Image (cartoon, rainbow, N blue to C red):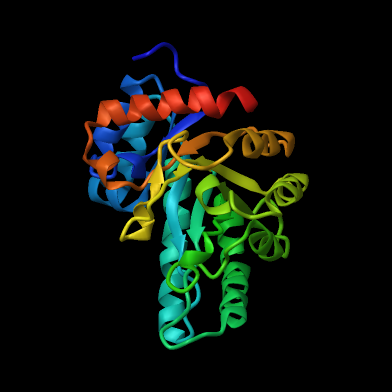
Amino acid sequence: MSGAAATRFSLNQATIKFASLTEAVDATVAAGIPSIGLWREPVAEFGLQASAAYVRDAGLRVSSLCRGGFLTAVEAGARAAALDDNRRAIEETAALGAPALVLVVGGLPAGSRDLAGARERVRDALGELSLDARAAGIQLAIEPLHPMYVADRAVVSTLGQALDIAEQFDARDVGVVVDTFHVFWDPDVLPQIARAGASGRISSYQVCDWNLPIATDALLSRGYPGDGFIDFESLTRAVAAAGYEGDVECEIFRQDIWDAPYPSVVETSLSRYRELVEPYL
């Protein structure tokens, strides 16, 4: 361990994707990191209550749970199934003690080109799920994704679009994720971060870099902060000025990072956070 860890750093479990829940928790603790962002699949594999106990006994915070969402279905049965799954995810978030459930809202249904209609269905679904979030004491966190994912993963592409939806609900119930990979390119990102902060809607700040060349699977084009093209100083200063005081997650999807030994990935993630993010919080 390279000294005491930063008090607001969180390792998102996706950064060491192939680690089991216990391996991810143990690697986080070994590095002196105080918080972890969890994913539903490894939590389910280990068991929800067992996962909550393991994290709690390790002395870690859970910064977020990923993921809910995929709320754009047209067909009634598919829509009902998505709502039911999100209600389960809300319960899981509360059981783990996480403040927010990250939502990837979903892409266009098969054969559809109606982006506006898909965004309306996201809004309508949140109108139902926000009641469950309120009852559970957690925040639904809309994550805008880079526009290259608009067809298959998220019809919400900008922080402004995410806020247009979120602001229709109480800030206690619905917020937004600021993920550097997805928003750094947006010429309006800094004022939109300020807008999110003004109403207390920044649910999570996630950091990783934008690397080239784009991978064949575009999901895997992220990198350690400092390896790509993102200006972490300006984004982090904006998030701090907006009043965000929560954990900062490092969330990386990249095959060579996934293939590397977990301790080295964790240490590199932490050292890049210390160098490129923490000074501006």
Q: Residue at x 43, y 88 (%)?
A: 111
Residue 31 in the image: above or below residue 242: above
Q: Nearer the viewer, residue 23 or 230?
A: 230
Expressed as whole percent of the image width and height from the top left, the position of residue 121 reads 58, 77
Above or below, 139 relative to 280: below
Residue 122: % across, % down:
57, 72
Pick the residue in front: 15 or 223. Answer: 223
Classify residue 15 by image quadrant. Answer: top left
Q: Is residue 243 left or right of residue 129?
A: right
Residue drawn at 68 percent across, 51 percent down? 189
Tell me: 270 left or right of 193.
left
Vertical placement of residue 266 versus 16, above or below: above
Please provide percent x and percent y for residue 207. Answer: 50, 40
Q: Quadrant of the C terminus?
A: top right
The quadrant where residue 67 appears = bottom left
Measured along the vertical axis of the image, is residue 83 above or below residue 231? below
Work out whether residue 34 can be spotted: no
Q: Nearer the viewer, residue 63 or 187?
A: 187
- Seen as rendered, the residue at the extreme top is 3
Which residue is at 34% across, 14% downward? 1
Residue 178 in view here: yes
Q: Which picture quadrant has residue 12?
A: top left
Q: Position of residue 223 (x, y in %)?
A: 40, 41
The outermost residue toward the front is: 213
Q: Is residue 203 left or right of residue 240?
A: left
